[in-house]
Each structure stands twice: as C-alpha cells, then as structure tokens.
C-alpha cells in the first residue's frame, strides 16, 4: 500500500523563505505530484530541493534518507531510484509534494549538500541541473 494523506484537511502554509531561491528554474515535473511515504523521515519539514526517491519494488515515493544528525543525505537505499526534487516545502504531516525532474536547482541553497550524490543524480536525471552560478 502506498503513502496516504488527508486531502480534505486545511492545508498549512510553510514559509521556509528559500523555496524560490532553491528552485531556480522549473522545466518539468511529475503531473499532480505525489504523496510521500514519510514513515522513516525524522525532520518536521520536507524542504524545497529535497531529493525524492522511488522504491521500485512497491512504487512508493519517499524523501531521500537523511543522517541521524539531520545534516546530510544517506546513501540511496537498494531497489530505489532518484526521481527529482521537492518543489515547495511541506510539513511532514501533509507530505503532498510537487516533484521536479527537469530544471535548475541552486545546490548552495538546497536543504542538504548534494556533492556526494550529484553524479548519480546527473546520470539518473540528466535534465535536472544542480548549480549556483
């Protein structure tokens, strides 16, 4: 069973202040977005620019795992693939996110450093560019 969210609830607005700085140019994304499985995500907000992955065995979308300090991405889990980045910050209680797979992301303003996964992301999603110049 995939991730679920209550679509009838009042939506909470998150003003992370960095969304428009992180997502520099949106070209294309997953139509309608996805509800993320946040069962193993320990932070209160999924910020714009956070890498999104998909479990290929269950077709479940998730935020990329973060280390216990909440300072860096962990490794891509087995049977998962990169699918894009979150477009707008959302609270974990309402993990309904837009996912961009083509466009430009400001890597210096991203929620976590992408240096360790940038090459793998470039191979998986060649139309998603991480840069800051």
Image (cartoon, helix red, strand yellow):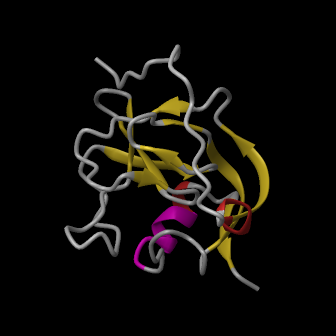
Observer-nearest residue: 70 or 25? 70
Residue 6, picture quadrant:
top left
Rendered location of residue 117, percent (x, y)? 43, 71
Q: Is residue 108 left or right of residue 118?
A: right
Figure check: 13 above or below 2:
below
Residue 128, picture quadrant:
bottom right
Q: Residue at horizontal 31%, vertical 58%?
A: 76
- Placement of the N terminus among the 4 image quadrants: top left
Residue 127, picture quadrant:
bottom right
Q: Residue at horizontal 74%, vertical 61%?
A: 20
Figure check: 103 above or below 34:
below
Q: Is residue 89 left or right of residue 79?
A: right
- Placement of the C terminus among the 4 image quadrants: bottom right
| Residue most extreme to the left | 68
Number of numbered markers: 0
Observer-nearest residue: 74 or 71? 71
Rendered location of residue 99, percent (x, y)? 60, 43
Rendered location of residue 18, percent (x, y)? 65, 66
Observer-nearest residue: 57 or 29? 29
| Residue most extreme to the bottom | 133
Rendered location of residue 57, percent (x, y)? 28, 30
Asked if the magenta segment contains residue 121, the reply would be yes
Asked if the magenta segment contains residue 29, the reply would be no
Range of the magenta residues? 116-122
Q: Residue at horizontal 51%, vertical 63%?
A: 121
Assign the magenta stretch its main secondary structure: helix
Observer-nearest residue: 74 or 93? 93
């Amino acid at each position: 069973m995939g991730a679920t969210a209550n679509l009838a609830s009042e939506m909470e607005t998150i003003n992370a202040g960095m969304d428009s700085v992180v997502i520099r140019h949106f070209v294309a994304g997953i139509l309608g977005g996805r509800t993320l499985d946040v069962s193993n995500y320990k932070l209160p907000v999924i910020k714009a620019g956070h890498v999104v992955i998909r479990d290929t065995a269950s077709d479940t979308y998730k935020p990329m795992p973060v280390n216990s300090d909440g300072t860096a991405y962990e490794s891509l889990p087995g049977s998962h693939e990169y699918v894009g980045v979150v477009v707008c910050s959302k609270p974990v209680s309402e993990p309904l996110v837009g996912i961009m797979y083509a466009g430009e992301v400001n890597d210096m303003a991203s929620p976590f450093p992408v240096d360790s996964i940038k090459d793998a992301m470039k191979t998986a999603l060649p139309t998603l560019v991480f840069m800051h110049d």
